Image (cartoon, rainbow, N blue to C red):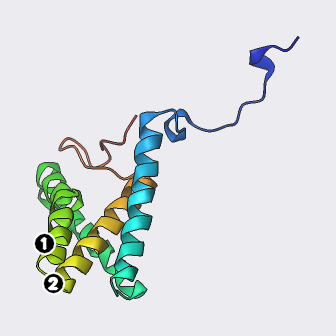
Amino acid sequence: MTNAAARPSRHVPARLSLQHPLGLLRVEGLALCILSAAAFLHEGGHWGYLFLGFLADLTFVGYVAGPRVGAALYNAVHSTVLPIALTAAGLLLNQPLATLSGLVMLAHIGFDRAAGYGLKFPDAFGHTHLDA
């Protein structure tokens, strides 16, 4: 007869488990990153331009003015609302630059979410919606 307590653990933190909401959010981020990057390449973008998404992280400079300003700037650029609208507008209006720009932004946001970087709360730099 085996005891459940005697079973070896998998050493997976709960928040990285797919049974935990934060684990699911990170997997969603990974899916967003991969699918956005694939769509970017399918639409004719050069893979090297995907690195331009990291320019969004320059919004950290806003933290010089304080955590409220920093969080507001970071969240404005790291929310999916603007890049989804930009991508949709680019597709509807046949504007490849808008489409590709939106996809780069979405890929970056997905990368950040998969890595555990979430939208910021105004109280502290490290306090995000992905904290557990």
Residue 121 image-quadrant placement: top left
- Answer above or below: position of 86 versus 42: above
Is residue 26 toward the left or the right of residue 58 in the image? right
Indicate which disc residue 89 carries: 1
Is residue 97 toward the left or the right of residue 109 in the image? left
Is residue 102 toward the left or the right of residue 117 in the image? left
Q: Residue furthest top?
A: 1
Is residue 43 toward the left or the right of residue 90 in the image? right
Q: Position of residue 19 (x, y in %)?
A: 52, 33
SS label for mark 1: helix
Which image quadrant: the N terminus?
top right
- The amino acid marked with disc number 2 is Gln
Q: Local crowd at mark 1 within 10 Å, few (<14), some, or many (≥20)?
A: some
The residue drawn where x is 17% and y is 79% is 98
Q: Local crowd at mark 2 within 10 Å, few (<14), some, or many (≥20)?
A: some
Q: Are marks 2 and 1 in contact (CB under 8 Å)?
A: yes
- Figure disc tally: 2
Q: Position of residue 71 (x, y in %)?
A: 18, 52
Indicate which disc residue 95 carries: 2
Precedes in sequence: disc 2 or disc 1:
1
Q: Position of residue 73 (x, y in %)?
A: 14, 59
The residue drawn where x is 24% and y is 59% is 78
Q: CA distance from mark 2 to mark 1?
A: 8 Å
- The amino acid marked with disc number 1 is Ala
